[in-house]
Amino acid sequence: MVEQMGQAGETLRFEAEVTRLLSLMVHSVYSNRDVFLRELISNAADACEKLRMMALEQPELLGDDPDFKIVLSADHDGGTLVIEDNGIGMDRDELVGNLGTIARSGTRAFLEGAAGGEGSALIGQFGVGFYSAFMVASSVEVVSRQAGSAEAWRWWSDGTGTFQLEPVPIEEAPARGTRVLLTLKDDAKTYAEQATIERVVAEYSAHVPVPIWLRIGGDGVGEKTLADGSALWRKSKSAVGDSEYAEFYGHVSGQYDEPALTIHYKAEGRHEYSVLLFVPSMRPFDLFDPERRGRVRLYVRRVYITDEAAILPGWLRFVRGVIDSEDLPLNLSREMLQKNPILEAIGKGVTSRILAELDKLAESDGETFEKVWTSFGAVIKEGLYEDAERRDGIYRIARFRTTRGDGWRSLADYIADLRPNQTAIYYALGDDLDAIKASPQLEGFAKRGIEVLLLSDPVDAFWVRTALGYDGKPFQSVTQGAADLDKVPVAEGEAETEAASDSAVATLAALFKQTLGERVSDVRASSRLTSSPVCLVAGEAGPDRQLEKILSAQNQAMPRGAPILELNPGHALIKGLAEKAAAGGKTETLEDAAVLLYGEARILDGEAPENPADHVARVGKLLAAALG
């Protein structure tokens, strides 16, 4: 919103979310304020990389200055710090759009995390790094001139809710690019000292792909190279130290955690490319962004192309880093990026390598791998659903919570502990682990010592439907189809319970089916229950009960099939009702029991009775009869 306009320019108001963000920055109490310099240097490097790419088709944009650089100028006495680049620059509209609004998704998550004290660890993840300057500056001035333009613009703000915008004489602006001038707060003037600047650049920005120079003193006397702009990913692995990897990871990821896995190699053969990728140890806040975009940067012979190329599949979108091709053309269009066979081949090769490295990590450092799986397993399992070619590789690294303890278990662990005559890998789906563990359908499996996978991620309901099996054993839901558990012996220490006669249970089942009508597709005796009287299961065909719930919640057009009501012949209540039914007992009481037990089964399944009022009335009638 423009508040005033005159010859000096105009004053505009930040959008609401920027204002909230600025308040957090201005009043910041984050212990690590160094992050602002890394973010401003990273922005400057990106501007240079973008111009490097554009200059391939428009070399005139470089003029007589073909060498990219970032220059830091510090004046301790004056209390200022300048970060200047000769990159692409910004025009008026871009200054407003880039510095007055936040277009990137995830801002709300950032603000919530920052308000909770996590801000310094999140600043770089959402494209809001520029505003971190207000942690150390009482005001920020940005003068920018877009490459090839005859106009320059000045942006200024003190971070209190508005910013000023005005044209500036061309002689007062950079020849091209952007100059950011910070007027430092009194308690932040150390950032205008040479030692502090050198320390921060060495720790966070030593390997940005653009040289960094430092000038000390208001008159520009004294100049020193802080970083040579070498491409770390093109060096041999033996020539790079852990600290260099960590610093570069921070640059490309915008995060401050330590990478759990670093993958650095050069591929040679049909296609030649360099790879430097990182698996984070902390979840990015945009991990579940519906667009499922990756954040791997694509270079061609050290020329930055884009960070939006779909090189890796969506189920590896948490991976960060750089892929640099020797074979791709430099003038890649968006359409070519989507259909290029070389890029597709690179993506397949890198995906296979990532899976292999994760497999090695699981073997060599189980503790670190489990942290990776805890953070990203729900995303990796998307590959089981959509990437049949890689399914076996994902099976090898997949880890699951099961009914056997609280730790993670692999499918190989599961197969090694199969019970005698067990022919399937059993799983249970649900919204959370505690709810799944309370499922009555697990009782018969527990009695026989059969391990069950506990699947609580939404994607689980989908991949198990397309999974053919593992090591010759099919996947089988504990809430779908006939359990067929009688062939598996009861576990040691477990006793068989005395059940009602088959004929009596059959009579009761028939009466229940007649009473419930179309609400159930069948009523039958169960081998999967030991302590609960009833449960609901899905038929052999069609979706699992949990998948039905997910699709229904998403309003997808899939009618829910009528479930099967299973009765526990060994439960005292079912035995009593079966005897009453076989003896021709009072029909009304048995009908009430059918409706109430069906409602109880729905409650155990996490749903309400179909008719709560009727359910309550029948309970009241039974209680009154018992008291009478």
Image: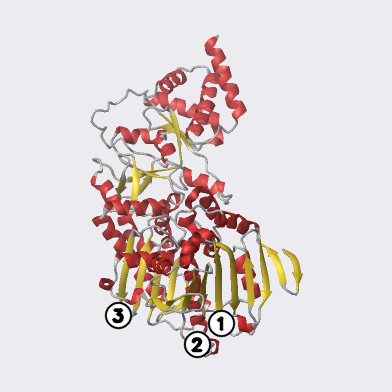
Within 10 Å of disc 3 (Cα), the crowding (few <14, some 14-19, many 20+) is few
Could you tell me the amino acid type at mark 1? Arg
Q: Mark 2 falls on what kind of element? A: loop
Rendered position, 46 above or below 476: below
Could you tell me which quadrant the N terminus lies in?
Answer: bottom right
Q: Within the image, what quadrant is residue 579 found in?
A: top left
Is 256 on the left or on the right of 44, as rendered? left
Q: Which of marks 3 and 1 is in front?
A: 1
* Residue at 63%, 77% in the rendered image: 91
Pointer 1 with pointer 2, Cβ within 8 A: yes
Pointer 3 with pointer 1, Cβ within 8 A: no
Residue tagged by mark 3? 269
Could you tell me the amino acid type at mark 3? Gly
Residue 341 in sight = no
Rounded to the nearest angstrom, the CA distance separating label 3 from label 2 is: 36 Å
Could you tell me the amino acid type at mark 2? Asp
Residue tagged by mark 2? 65
Q: Mark 1 falls on what kind of element? A: loop
